[in-house]
Image (spheres, helix red, strand yellow):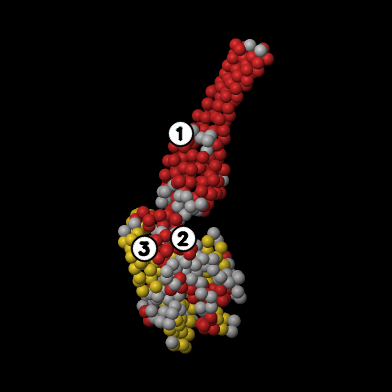
Amino acid sequence: MSVLKFTGAFLLFMATVLIGAGKYNQMCERRHTLESIISSLRLMEGVLRSSHAPLEDCFLKAGGFFTKTSSFIKDGMSPAGAVQKTASLCKTLSIRDKDALDRFASGLSAPDFEGQLLNIRALMDELSNELGDTVQNIKTKGSLMLRGSFLVGVAVFILII
Amino acid sequence: MGLESVLKFLPNEISGAIRFFNEKDIQEIRIVAEGSCAITIKGRLCDTGIKVSKAQLAKVIADMCRGSIYAVQPTLVRGYLTLAGGHRVGVCGSVTVENGNVKYMGDISAICIRIAREVKGVSDKFMNTIESGGRIFNTLIISPPGCGKTTVLRDIARNLGNRYRVCIADERSEIAACVGGASQNDIGKYTCVLDGVPKGVGIEMLLRTMSPEVIITDETGSFDEEKAIYQVINCGAKIITSVHGYSEKDVSRRKYIGSLIENGVFERIIVLSDRCGPATVEKVISDGRVIERA
């Protein structure tokens, strides 16, 4: 009986720790995705400035997050639709990030070069702010989650034992 | 890069109707939003009776621009865009003007797709006129629209480009039809193409950098181009170019090209028509004398 009790308590401890670690990991993954999008946008801005290339080529050269976007356009999707689909497939982004990408997608129909650059800049600014918040959250809430889940797990373990 | 490279952009209804015609006879496809779609066959306009909505035309344009209208805006403000294969799409729409210059073209309401064709050997019949005894003559090709000027220039480039340093200033990407920097047509082994550049500027750039023996360019007529052609002559290179017109008299009345003809810049003038099919030679003038008449 005591072995069963011990095993159950241990499993609950592990589950609590894993939930905390999972949440922390989710925050870190979001940070990585945001960093990747921002660096791709920087590249895209450079490509656009230097070559005035069509969006499909810009996304392809920007790479990272937008590699899929480029292939969706190649398959016949509109650039706006392709960005929205790429965003929807990305599990690590928050609803606010996806809203920002949606706005960026609608801005892609800008008929002029300056409009395209402004659209990229606007998304970069928005995502940079989100990235700042995420980094802050990882520092505060993230470590709290890790420690908290560990302590809750220990508490549950002791209570059951 | 035949007609199919154009048809893929058009609504199925239109492309299906166009496929009923002989591909070789189709010269133009004209689509008017909320109007109809017509095809020019052997110079005659044939209505397909297919109505095209504004949204359909917008989709056609978006597909042609690969969803990036800003990328083609520099040519769009000049009223056209070029498709892979060298097909030129003339465009009508709402224009925004800033400081007297066209800044944007939007709300496109009509397009006219001119089908480009590569006809190898079309210039063979007058190559002896353009080049003789290892010497190339400054040549002007005069022809009404749709009679094969560009096709002839492309073939001249192919003929000369395997033996001479030929350069093309291809402002509207019609001669070489470059896509991603690579020519879609056979323009000769050694032919260099400066793509998308205004002809006057392009000719000067080629002279400075590529030491050309021959420069080929299409549809000359502005002051800048006249100035550039004089530079070609002064540098000892040769110019082969074309102009819209029906006869040398008709063209001589024009300000800039007329002055070039008057000053004897062109050693050979070839007048084309479509009387017996595209690129029918009507007249060849050598140093002011008619040496061949149809």
How many numbered discs sit on the rendered protein?
3
Q: Is residue B272 visible?
A: no
Q: Chain of mark 3?
A: B
**Label 3 packing within 10 angstroms: few (<14), some (14-19), many (20+):** many
| Badge 1: chain ID | A
Residue at (42%, 51%) from the top-left corner?
A: A112
**In the rendered image, which residue does mark 3 sit on?**
B31
Circle number at residue B8: 2
Q: Nearer the viewer, residue A47 or B199?
A: A47
**Label 1 amino acid?**
Arg
Q: Where residue B80 appears, x then y in whole percent? A: 41, 62
Name the residue: 60% across, 74% down. B162
Give the farthest residue toward the left: B35
In the image, which disc is placed on residue A96? 1
Q: Residue at x 42, y 60 (%)?
A: B12
- Residue found 56% across the figure and 83% down from its top: B132
Identify the amino acid type marked 2.
Lys
Q: CA distance from mark 1 to mark 2?
A: 38 Å
Q: Secondary structure at mark 2?
A: loop
Q: Secondary structure at mark 1?
A: helix
Q: Can marks 3 and 1 be said to lie on one chain?
A: no
Alpha-carbon distance for marks 3 and 1? Answer: 42 Å
Give coordinates of residue B259: x percent, y percent.
41, 76
x, y percent for residue B220: 44, 71
Relative to residue B56, is residue B143 depicted above or below?
A: below
Q: Is residue A129 left or right of residue A14?
A: left
